[in-house]
Image (tube, helix red, strand yellow):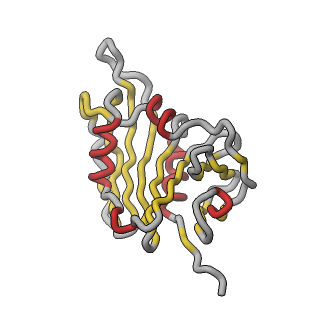
Amino acid sequence: MPVHASHARKTPRLLGLGLVSLGVLFGGCEGCQKKAPGEDVQAEDAGLRSGVKVPLPPGWSAQVATDGSFQAGPPGRPALRVDLKPGQGEQMPSSETLADNVRQQMKQFTLSLDQEEDTPSFALLRVTMAPALTDGGLGPEAPAFFGARRVGDDLFLCASLPGASTEEVRLATEACRSIQVQAAPR
């Protein structure tokens, strides 16, 4: 499992996902249904599908957003979003493709590449983002991750949500990496 960490290089004007854009793409939780906290949440209860399990850190809870996505995090503050793409496992993007998409879609942020990882069933892109200011400077940095997990024929797309701390991004990454689908009971 190769892991490639950059040298925390800054890429001037290399633009990526912005907090404002993430807020729009992965909207807030107004109207979300809270789910019981637990270390191992049945994602079936969170709108993904029967048999899907997303192992969560202690104290985290899961909820279903109004758009049907699975969201989880510490009490009152989701840090992870997961979207199921049934039958699209063959289309799992590489970390390079994730990076290209982030650069294309989020043009108001400068990115520092922190980690890329690719395995046959998991791709990870972890970055530090800073908004490009109109005066040419940079705003406060924030951690983020984007991931894809293939389980059988299905694809799970994961991302951290705005406001997640560095530790929450790490925990969300591990939850995404550990998504499982259990066989249906006979």
> What quarter of the picture does the C terminus occupy?
bottom right
Horizontal arrangement in the rendering, residue 92 relative to residue 42 (left or right): left
Q: Is residue 157 left or right of residue 32?
A: left
Image quadrant in which the N terminus is located: bottom left
Q: Residue at 55% across / 48% down in the picture? A: 80
The image quadrant of residue 150 is: bottom left
Q: Which residue is at 54% across, 52% downward?
A: 171
Q: Is residue 20 above or below residue 161?
A: above
Work out whether residue 180 or residue 56 is closer to the camera in this orientation and state it. Answer: 180
Classify 54 as above or below 108: below
Q: Is residue 176 left or right of residue 40?
A: left
Q: Nearer the viewer, residue 116 or 78?
A: 78
Q: Position of residue 101 (x, y in %)?
A: 31, 45
Q: Residue furthest bottom?
A: 186
Q: Is residue 97 above or below residue 132?
A: below
Residue 120, percent from left and from top: 34, 70
> Residue lying farthest top?
135
Q: Please report the residue visible at 64 percent of the width from the left and 64 percent of the height from the top.
A: 44
Q: Position of residue 59 (x, y in %)?
A: 70, 52
- The residue lying at 43 percent from left, 47 percent from top is 145
Q: Is residue 145 visible?
A: yes
Compare residues 35 and 172 and report the one nearer the observer. Answer: 35
| In the rendered image, the vertical position of residue 61 relative to residue 23, given as above or below | below
Does residue 110 show up? no
Q: Position of residue 28 (x, y in %)?
A: 59, 36
